[in-house]
Image: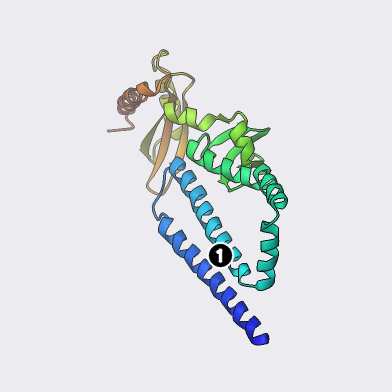
């Protein structure tokens, strides 16, 4: 009897070990080692977690069924249609519904990792999209844990997607000897001269980077339509270069 139990436990252990190895291999197969766009990264992470959850779930269930007592209990439960209906009903209303909603959100992409959103009374930056919950980080550092079913049924306000379609950001490299306050003033004045029928709101100018060699100033403007963004960026670059040359900042 003891030997039989040891054999069964050994088989269960081997099944669990094989499951972990399979999960690890699947993780490496679908892992990406290069930078992904936000929408691609969102889908990838949800699919990755889903695959690992299925593999581990099947493996654990297979290991448990090796034990006769567990198999007998499972058989008696499966023989009861009423219990099956109850379990399926509860799962569909809670975990399963959130799981399915998470996959739908990942592929529909109403929000992505890093997006600034407002949904179900929560507003902030999307930090993580899990299998059942999505984590939104508020401006004060607090976290909102929003069930994925809320994301699939409620209205989502996504400010990042709207800005990304129309945002024009022009970066200007300057020597450290340049008067940055003066440059910010000049570039803001230049950006404000853009035609009103193209820009949708006031431009923004700020120092985005400083290192030992140079400083980088970013000029942001928002086009009324996505089709105007490329031409707006070209116009803004030409105006910036000419203005900096006229002021003697560029030779």
Secondary element at image label 1: helix
Q: Is residue 86 above or below residue 58?
A: above
Mark 1, residue position: 59
Q: Position of residue 8 (x, y in %)?
A: 61, 78
Which residue is at a point 41% across and 20% down the rendered structure image? 225
Q: Is residue 5 above or below residue 18?
A: below
Q: Position of residue 173 (x, y in %)?
A: 36, 38
223 left or right, relative to 1: left
Depth order, front residue of 105/114 = 105
Depth order, front residue of 159/208 = 159
Asked whether the viewer can see residue 134, the reply is no
Q: Residues within 10 Å of mark 1 (few under 14, many from 20)?
A: many
Q: Is residue 44 above or below residue 228?
A: below
The figure's colour scheme reads rainbow
Q: Residue furthest left?
A: 251
- Image quarter of the C terminus: top left
């Amino acid at each position: 009897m003891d030997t039989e139990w040891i054999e069964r436990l050994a088989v269960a252990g081997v099944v669990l070990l094989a499951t972990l190895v399979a999960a690890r291999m699947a993780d490496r197969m679908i892992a990406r080692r290069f930078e992904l766009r936000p929408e691609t990264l969102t889908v990838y992470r949800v699919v990755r977690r889903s695959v690992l959850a299925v593999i581990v779930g099947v493996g654990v269930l297979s290991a448990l069924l090796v034990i006769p007592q567990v198999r007998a209990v499972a058989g008696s439960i499966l023989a009861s249609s009423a219990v099956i209906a109850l379990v399926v009903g509860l799962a569909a209303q809670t975990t399963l519904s959130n799981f399915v909603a998470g996959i739908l959100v990942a592929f529909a992409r109403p929000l992505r990792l890093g997006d600034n959103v407002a949904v179900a009374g929560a507003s902030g930056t999307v930090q993580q999209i899990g299998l059942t919950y999505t984590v939104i980080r508020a401006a004060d550092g607090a976290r909102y844990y929003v069930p994925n079913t809320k994301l699939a049924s409620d209205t989502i306000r996504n400010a990042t997607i709207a800005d990304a379609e129309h945002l024009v950001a022009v970066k200007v490299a300057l020597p450290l000897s340049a008067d940055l306050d003066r440059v910010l003033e000049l570039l803001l004045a230049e950006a404000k001269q853009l035609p009103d029928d193209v820009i949708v709101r006031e431009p923004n100018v700020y120092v985005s980077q400083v290192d030992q060699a140079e400083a980088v100033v970013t000029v942001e403007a928002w086009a009324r339509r996505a089709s105007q963004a490329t031409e707006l960026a070209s116009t803004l670059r030409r105006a910036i270069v000419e203005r900096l040359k006229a002021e003697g900042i560029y030779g």
